[in-house]
Amino acid sequence: MKSYRTYIIVITVLFIAFVVVEYYKPKPLNWDKTYINKDKIPYGTYVMYDVLKDVFPGMKIQTIRKPIYNHLQNYFYYSENDSGEEVLKPESEELQNYLFIADNFSSDTLDVTYLLYFVETGNSVFIAASDFNSPLFDTLNIEPKYSASIKNDSVKISFINKEFNQPYKIKRSDADHYFLSKDSTGNQSMQVLAVMDSNRATFIRAPFGKGNFYICSTPVFFSNIQLLEEHDNDFAYKALSYLPVKEVFWDEYQKQGAEGEDSLLRAVLAQESLRWSYYIALASMIIFIVFEAKRRQRIIPVIEPLANSTLEFTRTLGNLYLSKGDHKNIGTKKIQYFFDFIRDRYRLQTNEVNDELIKAIAEKSGSEKSLIDDIFRMINFVQYNNSISEKNLLDFNSLLEKFYLRSA
């Protein structure tokens, strides 16, 4: 019991010491490009989300943790047009802005369908991402292209608008995509708003119906580290100024998933110190269970099987009869055992002894009929005499043993 307490105390002290050291040690800076509105790390969007109320004064800012289709389906309903066809119509005439700022923008066909309806009715969609995985661009006749040039470590981004004509310098790895128009008719499917190195479009406007898509390939401009720079920190404000001052839907589903996926365990595993604390506690519990279960397991007593004393009993009983010279009694017992054997083994009735019974026993046991005749002759002899000699008993027993041997 004393060693058990010592083990628990040592593990507890080590665990507490580890947690304290991990908690107070300097935290390494997280450079992951999460673009999450709650993250204050360099590539979070805490600052951008906080200043949206100034960019869109007086407008409601709503955080969305649903897929595009699940969110927008509440803003449309099906109605028949003049041709009798069912078409989507907006529930309200109020216009909105839908903002996506993420490292990767992805959407399926159903999402794109509702995004197109959303913009077609006069709303605006703003997408800032480093990578694109969506059929939206096929509909808009726009092709995102990867820039593989490694000539310079940095690039310059400039707005086409002369009033915004101030170059912004960023790392080339943060501006590795640009846009090309795929419209084969010669019509411009996009309007270039900002370019990289004076010739590659990185920020565009794509009109669709009554509204517009605004697409930017440099989301770093909307991150905390860029917005808190002393210089060149207003690209995000200028880009968002193209949007009308309307209610804003800020998408977090592309980065955090659906509501409820940020469970306690997920939050614990997201932090290195908490994650290791959880692993150590779990491992300690498993070690304790294994060793404590071994130490406290009761020794299973060895139970000797009961000895088969039937043979000894039979010998004792036989010796008792032999010592008294009661050969008749022993012979009678052997007759009873023989009839029990015939009934159990061959399912034959022994109430009446006749030639049919003898013949059936010989056929089922595989013995000669002469042997069965001799056995029943001895049975009659034992039954109808008041006493028999030892020789008669031995002869009877010899016949029975021969029968049992052949019936085995």
Image (cartoon, helix red, strand yellow):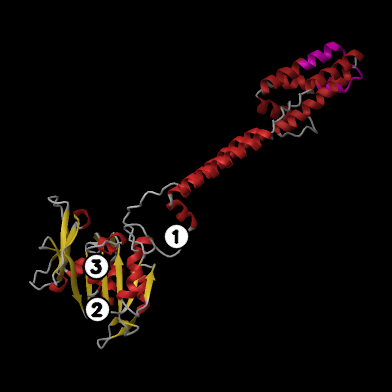
Residue on which disc 3 sits: 234
Q: Residue at x 11, y 69 (%)?
A: 183
Locate residue 165, reporting x and y percent: 14, 69
Give the position of the C terminus as an image quadrant: top right
Q: Marks 3 and 2, Cα distance to the nearest angstrom? A: 29 Å
Q: Marks 1 and 3, Cα distance to the nearest angstrom? A: 32 Å
Locate residue 180, reporting x and y percent: 13, 64
Q: Residue at x 81, y 22 (%)?
A: 334
Q: Nearer the viewer, mark 3 or mark 2?
A: 3
Q: Which mark is residue 262?
A: 1
Callout 1 amino acid: Asp
Locate residue 347, reporting x and y percent: 71, 34
Callout 2 amino acid: Glu
Up-down relation of residue 72 to residue 292 (above or below)? below
Q: Residue at x 24, y 59 (%)?
A: 130
In the depicted view, which residue is nearer to us: 352 or 30? 30
Direction left: furthest residue? 186
Q: Marks 2 and 1, Cα distance to the nearest angstrom? A: 34 Å
In the depicted view, which residue is nearer to us: 404 or 1? 1
